[in-house]
Each structure stands twice: as C-alpha cells, then as structure tokens.
Image (cartoon, coloured by chain):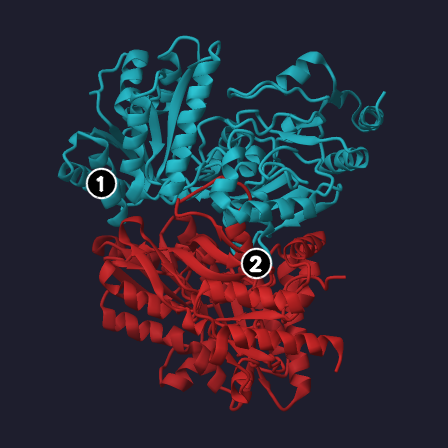
Chain colours: A cyan, B red
C-alpha cells in the first residue's frame, strides 16, 4: 500500500465518521458522478459526499486538506467542459441535499439560496412574489454550479450573466475556513471583489455553500417575434442597429439555416432554410408592442423576410419551443451522435465574419455543425456532431474548435462566452490570457497551496 | 547612510535615467502629490513620475521592485479616503501624460482609453458619436482612478458602477510584467475574473495602463423632476415602489432637510425644509414623460408635496444644479470647515432606518452633518463639517462615522458604497469581511510579495 493510498483510506474513514450513509462509495454513484454531458472520458471519484450544512462541507474539506484528497463540487452535472470530472480522484461533493431557498426579500429584490437549488426550482418558489431570477443557460442547472462557471444564456443581453446577478457568497476555502464575500448592499468599494473572483472559478478556489442573488420584476407583458434574413450579415446588422437604438431586448437569439433544417425535421415545421432571429421584449403592454414594431422596421431595412410577433403566451411558447428544442433537434439530426459544442464570443462588429468563417470551415469538414447563438452578446455555439465510435471525428471536431477559438482571439474575443474552462478549454488559456494565466496560477497557489480543490482545471499545472 | 536610503538613491538615479525631466523632485510637485481632498495628514512622495507609455510604467515598476521603493498611482487626486497618499514614501506615478482616447468603436459601443483621461474629457470626445460613458462620481476624476476605486455615483442605479462598465484592462504588475485582463467580448467564462479583481484594488495589485470601457447610447430624451416628502420613510417607500414597478430611473437622489437649508442659503432658493428626491429618466420622448408621470403618482401615494418635472434642458439643468452644488453649499454652510464624508451602503429595505438613526446621531453631536444619497442603491453620505483647528471635532466625526459603519454592517450593508478603502476605511475591513480580509492579504502577498504597490492600503499589514 502506497503512502498516498493509506492517506486516502484514512480520509475516507474520517469522512464516513462525519457523514455516515451520506458518504457513498457505491459503484453506481461513483459512475454517475464520473460522467459529464460531453465527450470526455469518464473519471469516477473515490467517494461521493452528500453534505447537509456548511459546517459539514467545512469539516469535509478540512479532512481532505489534511490527507491531500481532491475535492470536486457537483451541482446537476450539466456542465459541458468536464468541469466536475474527478480526474485526480478524490471526493465529489454533491449539493443535492443543500437545495433550499433560505430567504426571499421582495423589498430588496434579493434571495439567499443553497448551491444545490436549481434555477427552475427557484423560479417556481418565486412565482407568487412578482419577482424572478433571469439567468437561463438552457439546462435546469444548480445555482451553485451556474455561479461557479459564470453561466449566462438567452437573457444575458438584458439581465446580465451570473457575474452581474450574484451579490454575495458563502464559500468554504481549501483549508476548511468559511468566508462570506460581499454583502446585501447593491454596490460596494470595500476592497478586492472576492465575489467576482469566486464566480467563474469552477470550484478551484473554494466551494460555494450559499448564494445571495439579485432578483428582477416579472415583466408585466412580453412580446416575442421571429424573422428570417437572406444572410448572416443582414441578421447581425439588424441586431447592431437594434442595440444602438437602445431597444431593450430581453432575448435575441440566432439560428442558422442548418439549425432551421434540423428543427423542421424534428418538429414538423416549415421554416425557410435561412438564418433566423428570435426576439423577446419585456415591459409594459404598450412598450413591448412598440418595441416589437420598431424591431420589425429595423429588420425590414435589412431585408428580413417578414416578421411575425405576438404578445399572446401561447404564440410565444410555440415560437420559443423552436429555440428551446433546437439543440435536441440538432442532436437528433444525426443518429447516435454526440456533440462537441463550441462557445466563442466576439465583439458584435466581428460576429458576422466569425459566423461566416465558421460555416465555411464546417462546410469543408466531414462532420455537420449547425450554429445557434446569443447574438446580442456576440456569443455563438456550433454543435459539432460526431460519431462516438470514430476517433477521427472527435479529432476533426477538436481541430475545428481550435480554429474557431484562434479566430475569436484574433478578433478580440474569448474562447468561452458561458460554458467555462473545465477540461475542454484548458489548452486555450495561455493563448487567451498570456501572462495573466500565470497570475491565475499565483492566486490558486495562494488560496489552495495543496491543490486539492478541483485539481487539473482552469489554472496552469502548479509546479 | 542606511542601506534602504542607499537603495532609494540608486532607484531614483535609475528612474531619472529612464524618464529624464519627467521624474520630478521639485518641492511643489512633491507637496501637490502628497495631499488629498480629505482630512488626512499630507504624505509627500520622494519623487513624482510622469510616464508616457506602458513600457515606461513597466520599466519604472521593475526599477522600484529591484530597489524596494513604493509605487503609488495618481489620477486627479480627487479620492476621498487618502488612497494616493505616499505614506511609505516612494514614487507617485502621475498619469496626466497618459490621457488619450486610443480607439472608439461605435459599432461595439466600447472605447479604449489611457488611465489619466478624465470622464468629462472622454464624454467631450464622444459627443458626436451618439454614445456616452455614464459613470459619474461627481468629481471630474481620471478613469484609471475611477476603476481603481470601483467608483460610481448618481447614475449607478441605471448604468451600474465601474465594476459593470470596465470590459478589459492592461495592467503593470508588481514585478514589471504587463498583462491584459478580459477581452472585448461582452461576456466570458474563461477563468478567474482578473478584470473584476483589479477594479477596486486601489493600485495595490497593479497599475492600470489602459482601460476598455462599455459605452451607452445618449438618451433620445431626458425628463427630470423633484419633490419633497414629509419624512425620510415616505421618500424611501416611494423609491422602493418605483424600483419594484420596474420604472427605469437613470438617477434617483436624496437630499435631507439640512441639505435643503444649505442649498437655500447658498443658491438663494426657497426649498421647503424637508427631505427631497430628485429624479431623471432617460429614453424616448414618450417613455420619459410617461415614466415621470408614473413616478408622480407613486410619490403622491406616499404624501409627496407636489412633483415638478420637465423635459426641457434648461429646467433640468436648474433642477440638477441644486444637487450638483449641494456638496459645495453644505461646505459653505460652515465657514472654513473641512468635511469628513461618510459612505455607507445598505439594503434598500433598511435605508430609511439607517438614515433616520444617522440623523439622530448627528442631532446629538456637536458638529453639523447634512445628508445626501444615491437612494436607488441604498448608498448615502453624511457631510460631517469639522473645524480643522479643533482635533476634538475630527475625533467626534470619526466616532460618528464608526457608529454609522457598524450600523451598516449590522443591517447587511457595506462600509463604503463608492469611495473605497484607502486609509480611512482600513479599520473597518476586518469587521466587514472577517476571514475574507485575510484572503485579500493572501492575494496581495501572491501578486506583490515585496509590498511595493501602494503599501498601507486595503489589505491587512503583511507579516
């Protein structure tokens, strides 16, 4: 028995003493927490912990620190870059038993929740308050995980990302200390912004055990619309004009012709095989109608093929089901395929160029890759569909993804708008951040000198 | 000659070789850069540097690192907490020769500037573009300094603070390395948010040499209004209702009865001696008129004494001159007085209580302290007027300020909404952040192990 193995056994023993049945070593549990929703090789942990309190998390981390055992936080396992894979073994901390709303404060438009709570469960609890939490990454993710990956989604153009909607955190550090970052004040200049540092740190600097989130008023009315454009450049020009006019879009989404084809096949629709924009406006009844009309005029100026819009909930639902199902429609368009989903984000002025160059790359490749995007932020995804049994296709998808990222960086953008680094983007960090990536490593070393928190993610290998 | 003194001389020699006449040791220059706008004892540096390029800043910092000489960044010297005082001597880096707009990109609604550029100079350059930079802390501060202190001001309720409006930075680190944080993408999940870490770090982690800022569309129309309320609680209730209705206020400012009295005396006005709210709405002509009317109805529900509003620029200017002059009116209300300006920020639901308790404290004190505030954010300032020649008054003002901060923290708020830590708030950091303050120290130690960047500010003394 090696020295580390003996340490691991001692750690597991101490964790069992702490959590009893809530430390699981069952094969099915390890397998379930060793998988991701993406193309990565599974990496099961040595144990799965189900803590119920911050104190238990702190005690758990202190035990792991003592014995050098890795600790990986787990929300719903919906991340796309292998963030929660226990690539160095250790304990996965599943927050499903810390999933309560702790306090809603309607007057302050904020809420304090536990990290395992999902965004849909939160909004369900908020229904009667007139408030809602707007960040919508698609998956019904846990709010702790959404903060850890700095998630966003379709509404970021209006309501911001997790960066903008996390007011304060409670965090367990690598040595088991518990800190609170931020306050419930709407703004503060009181020193380093540790809240912003923890948001997007992917469990490598601490485990989030409590979040205080900003809420927003449920809109009095919503209008939604869709239109097709002759090409991507025209669609993007319409978006740019809309933003510059100051029209407050709540959502503005792009689907390309290949995505429209997949949606037609999946849902029996008959969309023209052209790029589409889908929009939503939130506000008073008069305002959302006026805004939809104004957008329609802008779209027409850019050659749109009609613009259908409605304020009726049933029409809106039908319209958005196209966007919500687009990912599944695309997956279904190639039988048995897995997806490698790219996530670049570029300045709006370079978006048309980035999408068109990406489409040309994909047209020249042997694998399909329909494109969807949060066009108001300059962020889009190519859903590269690969045959799992064919390693050459994964290699080709990775090569396409590399090319997209290099292009995004050359255009002044980022390798990842909202999915995060995890395993999949680690190779791009030096290119995106230069010497700044080493600074991230310096911060990691200062806060987690033993490298037990989600090792192998985000930062450079710690020498 | 001590060893450190010899080192300092060598450093000054090397800096002179680097900068020539742009390294100043003139008495007047040292005195000018040793003062603050507040009550702190002057602390002149050993030299003032006027770099013209990032490369010069990097070389300067590398020289100072080699010789252990402190480096303090200087914008316009308008900070209120003694941030730029060279309390450990060293070199003040005055950015007045790095004050250019480098690139405006109207399509992307962003701009890249040098740190010495003031916000008014930026908006002057932007006039013809239809865009503007909204953050307005009152003083015509340098944008580098505004980022370094995470400044905000009257428009934060609509447009956010510097936290929300800095997209990317170029920073010179403590060892002279130059990094770029962030990109021009509107959002990113690519690792630790070094931009947010640098914003608000007050020159203790790096020197900002370039900023990329978000711009906003100049509003098509502006409406502005003012009304008096019978008491503070009624005014705050009107604000809360306005926020919950989703009325998009661009500014909502509070002045108390004592401030109204000072304004009357200073500007020959005849405001009722009551709490007032001043508002501004930005949007389309129809929208800003509707919003002002809706606010008027909410205010009336809370017993407001009339509500005057206008969309005419001259009326708006007259109205806001009251707010813009309020600080000077208050200063003038006590001949020869200096001000200690408090800056707490609390959740909106606790704002009325915080203001009323503060007013009671001031009523029981021997010094006057009119109150102004950014009421939409829960942030307010008591302008404590002290006789410079009477140390007992400074002590009394500090005791009042301490009491306000302790109250703010007990109410879930922050010691400083927008002024920052500097010298004046250092004593509150342990109370506000608990163990989190030590984490700030850990980060400082990792990024500036020799403690040369603005030593004595923000973080705990480095052991």
Tag on residue A237?
Answer: 1
Tag on residue B173?
Answer: 2
Task: Identify the secondary structure beneath mark 1.
Answer: helix
**Residue ID at (44%, 81%):** B328
Whether residue A202 sits left or right of residue B250 in the image: it is: right
Q: Which residue is at the front of the view, A367 or A213?
A: A367
A211 over A123 or under it: above or below: below
A120 over B2 or under it: above or below: above
Task: Identify the secondary structure beneath mark 2.
Answer: loop
Residue A430 visible from this viewpoint: yes
Percent coordinates x, y for residue B245 in the rendering: 39, 48
Closer to viewer: mark 1 or mark 2: 2
B450 over A119 or under it: above or below: below
Quadrant containing the C terminus of chain A in the rendered view: top right
Within 10 Å of disc 1 (Cα), the crowding (few <14, some 14-19, many 20+) is many
Whether residue B359 sits left or right of residue B300 in the image: it is: right
A384 over A122 or under it: above or below: above
Residue B452's image quarter?
bottom right
Percent coordinates x, y for residue A283 in the rendering: 32, 42
Q: Which residue is at the front of the view, B317 or A115?
A: A115
Residue B127's image quarter?
bottom left
**From mark 1 to mark 2, how far is it between C-alphas?**
39 Å
Which chain's residue wears label 1?
A: A
Please report contact status of discs 1 and 2: CB closer than 8 Å, yes or no: no
Whether residue B286 sits left or right of residue A195 in the image: it is: left
């Amino acid at each position: 028995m090696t020295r580390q193995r003996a340490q691991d056994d001692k750690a597991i023993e101490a964790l069992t003493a702490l959590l009893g049945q809530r430390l699981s070593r069952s094969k099915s549990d390890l397998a379930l927490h060793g998988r991701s929703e993406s193309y990565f090789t599974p990496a099961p942990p040595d144990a799965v912990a189900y803590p119920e309190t911050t104190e238990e998390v702190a005690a758990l981390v202190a035990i792991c620190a003592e014995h050098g055992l890795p600790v990986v936080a787990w929300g719903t396992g919906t991340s796309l870059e292998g963030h929660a894979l226990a690539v160095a073994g250790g304990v996965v901390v599943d927050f499903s038993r810390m999933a309560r709303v702790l306090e809603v404060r309607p007057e302050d438009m904020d809420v304090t929740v536990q990290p395992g709570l999902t965004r849909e469960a939160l909004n369900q609890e908020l229904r009667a308050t007139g408030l809602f939490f707007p960040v919508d990454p698609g998956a019904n993710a846990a709010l702790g995980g959404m903060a850890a990956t700095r998630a966003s989604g379709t509404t970021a153009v209006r309501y911001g990302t997790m960066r903008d909607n996390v007011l304060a955190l409670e965090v367990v550090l690598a040595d088991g200390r518990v800190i609170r970052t931020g306050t419930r004040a709407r703004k503060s200049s009181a020193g380093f912004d540790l809240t912003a540092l923890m948001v997007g740190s992917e469990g490598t600097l601490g485990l989030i055990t409590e979040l205080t989130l900003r809420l927003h008023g449920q809109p009095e009315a919503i209008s939604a619309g869709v239109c097709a454009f002759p090409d991507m450049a025209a669609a993007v020009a319409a978006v740019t004009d809309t933003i510059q006019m100051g029209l407050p879009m709540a959502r503005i989404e792009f689907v390309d012709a290949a995505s429209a084809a997949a949606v037609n096949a999946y849902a029996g629709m008959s969309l023209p095989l052209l790029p589409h924009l889908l929009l939503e406006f939130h506000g008073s009844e008069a305002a959302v109608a006026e805004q939809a009309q104004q957008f329609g005029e802008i779209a027409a100026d850019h050659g749109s093929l009609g613009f259908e819009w409605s304020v009726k909930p049933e029409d809106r639902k039908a319209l958005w089901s196209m966007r919500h199902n687009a990912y599944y429609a695309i997956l279904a368009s190639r039988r048995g395929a897995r997806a490698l989903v790219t996530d670049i984000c570029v300045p709006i002025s370079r978006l048309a160029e980035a999408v068109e160059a990406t489409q040309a790359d994909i047209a020249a490749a042997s694998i399909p890759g329909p494109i969807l995007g949060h066009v108001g932020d300059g962020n889009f995804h190519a859903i590269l569909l690969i045959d799992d049994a064919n390693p050459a296709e994964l290699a080709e998808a990775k090569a396409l993804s590399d090319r997209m990222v290099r292009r995004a960086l050359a255009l002044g953008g980022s390798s990842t708008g909202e999915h995060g680094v995890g395993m999949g983007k680690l190779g791009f960090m030096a290119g995106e951040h230069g010497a700044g990536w080493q600074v991230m490593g310096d911060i990691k070393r200062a806060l987690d000198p033993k490298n037990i928190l989600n090792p192998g993610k985000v930062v450079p290998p710690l020498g």
